[in-house]
Image (spheres, rainbow, N blue to C red):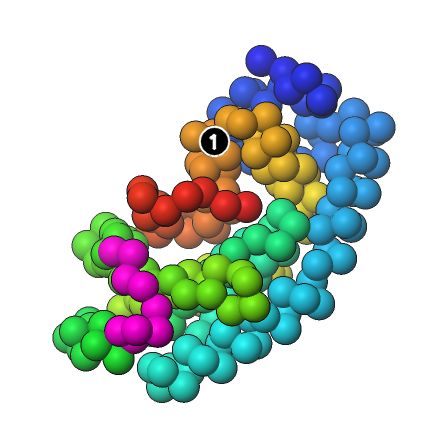
Amino acid sequence: MTNPHSALDLDAITAKGWADRSDFPPAEYAQATEFYAAMRAHDDKLSRVRATAAALIEQWTGHTPRDVGSFGTRLNLETSDLDLGIDYPVEQREDLVKALDGRAELLGERKTRFSTTRLVFAFHTDGIEIDLSVLAPEDFTVACRMLDQIEQTMTEEERVCHTWVKHLLWSSGRMEAYADWKLVTYRRFCSEFNWVPIPEKNSTP
């Protein structure tokens, strides 16, 4: 199946689980590059909001967060929600839930790796939703290593291609494929992790 606004075979690309320059006709890659540049125009605003949210999280929890979402990997669409993560001792999670009561909504507990879970909270800063993942310390270490690897090895061309496919899936209403596509970068660089969204939470770019 081909998206009506694109020459790309999205079914083939999503089945492959990755997108690169070879998948793109020259004209569409130029369009994707222009779109990616437009997304980067939101960087200053999102960086300011992220800094404010991170300061609040550190104030509330005593732990310094890291961006674990699409803005941190520069794969976001427009003014996406922000996803931040902290490490926190599993045996102290009940204390954390109490500390965040009235400040952030507990969305639930989700699997992170094969035998561990994370808590997910949400709150708003300057009109943007902030999702906070609370990971076991060893999982946070793995996540940071994965994010460092993405930062160091994912090329600008790959970011352009990935973001364009993400945009096409979102704009064409293919939400199941879109939700899965958001995770392909994490799976590519860290197959141990299972970044499954909270089911009851509306999917956002």
Q: Which residue is mark 1?
A: 175
Check disc 1 and report its element: helix, strand or loop. helix
Q: Residue at x 28, y 62 (%)?
A: 106
Is the residue 41 above or below the residue 36 in the image?
below
**Mark 1, other Cα within 10 Å: few <14 / some 14–19 / many ≥20:** some
Q: Position of residue 133 (x, y in %)?
A: 36, 63
Residue 68 in view here: no
Left or right of residue 5: residue 72: left
- Residue 101 colored magenta? yes
Q: Residue at x 36, y 82 (%)?
A: 60
Relative side of 72 to 92, left or right: right
Q: Quadrant of residue 30?
A: top right
Give the residue displayed 45% in from the left and 80% down from the top. Answer: 56
Residue 143 covered by magenta stretch:
no
Q: Is residue 53 left or right of residue 135?
A: right
Residue visible at 76% across and 57% down? 41
Residue range highlighted in magenta: 100-108
Of all residues shown, which one is farthest toward the top? 1
- Residue 163 at x, y = what percent? 64, 42
Q: Is residue 98 above or below residue 31?
A: below
Task: Count how many numbered circles sit on residues in the image.
Answer: 1
Q: Is residue 163 visible?
A: yes
- The three-letter amino acid code for the residue at tag 1 is Met
- Using the image, determine if residue 96 lies above or below residue 135: below
- Residue 143 in percent (x, y) is at 41, 63
Q: Quadrant of residue 164?
A: top right
Q: Quadrant of the N terminus?
A: top right
Q: Is residue 190 left or right of residue 111?
A: right
